[in-house]
Image (cartoon, rainbow, N blue to C red):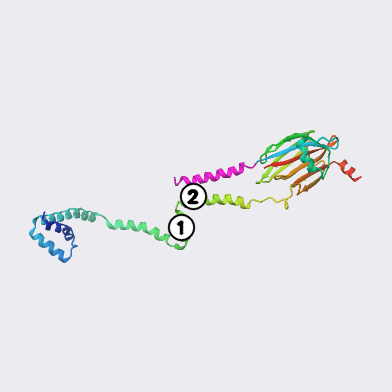
């Protein structure tokens, strides 16, 4: 029993270490929507976005195109097609307790429209907007689900 | 057996081994003169002694003691050579406390605790006052503006087309 004790401690240490490594994952909420000044329709799930955007860019219409919550693991890109003909690639680079560093790539026809790395934290939303779509613009928002 | 024999029998072995006092010696000898039973006991003790002594003495005579001593000396000499650096040995040889197995689990526990606590102590708490939300940003096709709001907890990355910029200038 005395000899088994250090071995058990070693096993415990290894399991804790591996658990700490394996716990590096984060769920992010990815929303893609079209914002424009044509009409005044605001999807109910985008009312919070409208309030946030209003001081900066005041659109009258917000139309949801995609709302999903993929789970990101370190260095494993998650690819999500986005309208129109764009691809969003999300990769978890690093995660501390309440902060996740995520690399975001938006591609169209193999060209990087955007390549950025952002820190997601509780309550903070990162929005990427601007590419024109019809009469309005496409906006992508990311927020961490901690 | 008489009562006097009983008390003498306790002294008889001591008498035989010459461990009695002068008074006890007189007492035993006076008793032996008048007691054939105790005399027989003493004789049997002497017989037992000679029985043991003879083979031991014989074995001792046959044993080659100088050879045994040489063997012992050979074993001792290397240890004496090691003693040239006593101070160095003092530092190199681990303490007897360290040899005890109790230290193995203790050290393992300490390492485990250190590993867990250093993670907590040295874990950098993210602060948005000294760390921007956007670590880097680049685009092959668009101009970029980044807006970070601390109060509204919102960060916006806005992409401009060439045409947008020109129209905003005009």
User: Mark 2 highlights which residue?
Assistant: B105
Q: Position of residue B90 (x, y in %)?
A: 46, 61
Q: Are marks 1 and 2 on the same chain?
A: yes
Q: Are marks 1 and 2 in contact (CB under 8 Å)?
A: no
Q: Is residue B118 left or right of residue A43?
A: left
Q: Quadrant of the C terminus of chain A?
A: top right
The correct choice, above or below, for B164 with respect to B58 in the image is above
User: Mark 1 highlights which residue?
Assistant: B95
Q: SS for tag 1?
A: loop
Q: Position of residue B126 (x, y in %)?
A: 69, 50
Q: Residues within 10 Å of mark 2 (few under 14, many from 20)?
A: some
Boundaries of the magenta span = A1-24
The residue at the far left in this view is B34
Q: Is residue A51 left or right of residue B60?
A: right
Q: Residue at x 15, y 55 (%)?
A: B45
* A30 and A43: which is toward the camera: A43
Q: Position of residue B81 (x, y in %)?
A: 41, 60
Question: Label 2 marks which chain's residue?
Answer: B
> What whole-number distance in Å separates the C-alpha atoms at marks 1 and 2?
17 Å
């Amino acid at each position: 029993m005395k000899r088994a004790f250090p071995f058990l401690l070693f096993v415990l240490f290894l399991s804790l270490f591996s658990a700490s490594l394996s716990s590096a994952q984060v769920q992010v909420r990815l929303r893609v929507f079209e914002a424009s000044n044509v009409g005044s329709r605001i999807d109910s799930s985008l009312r919070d976005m409208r309030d946030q955007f209003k001081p900066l860019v005041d659109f009258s219409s917000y139309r949801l195109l995609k709302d999903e919550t993929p789970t990101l693991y370190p260095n494993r890109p998650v690819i999500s097609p986005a309208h129109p003909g764009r691809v969003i690639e999300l990769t978890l680079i690093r995660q501390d307790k309440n902060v996740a560093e995520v690399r975001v790539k938006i591609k169209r026809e193999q060209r990087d429209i955007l390549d950025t790395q952002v820190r997601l934290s509780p309550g903070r939303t990162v929005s990427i907007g601007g590419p024109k779509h019809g009469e309005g613009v496409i906006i992508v928002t990311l927020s961490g689900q901690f | 057996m008489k009562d006097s024999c009983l008390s003498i029998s306790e002294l008889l072995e001591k008498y035989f081994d010459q461990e009695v006092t002068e008074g006890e010696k007189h007492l035993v000898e006076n008793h032996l003169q008048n007691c054939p039973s105790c005399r027989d006991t003493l004789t049997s003790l002497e017989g037992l002694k000679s029985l043991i002594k003879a083979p031991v003495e014989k074995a001792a005579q046959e044993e080659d003691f100088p050879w045994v001593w040489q063997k012992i000396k050979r074993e001792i000499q290397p240890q004496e050579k090691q003693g040239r650096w006593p101070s160095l040995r003092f530092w190199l040889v681990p303490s007897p406390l360290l040899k005890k197995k109790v230290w193995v689990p203790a050290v393992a526990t300490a390492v485990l605790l250190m590993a867990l606590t250093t993670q907590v102590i040295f874990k950098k708490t993210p602060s948005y006052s000294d760390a921007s939300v956007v670590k880097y940003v680049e685009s092959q096709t668009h101009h970029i503006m980044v807006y970070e709001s601390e109060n509204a907890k919102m960060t916006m990355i806005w992409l401009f087309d060439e045409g947008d910029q020109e129209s905003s200038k005009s």
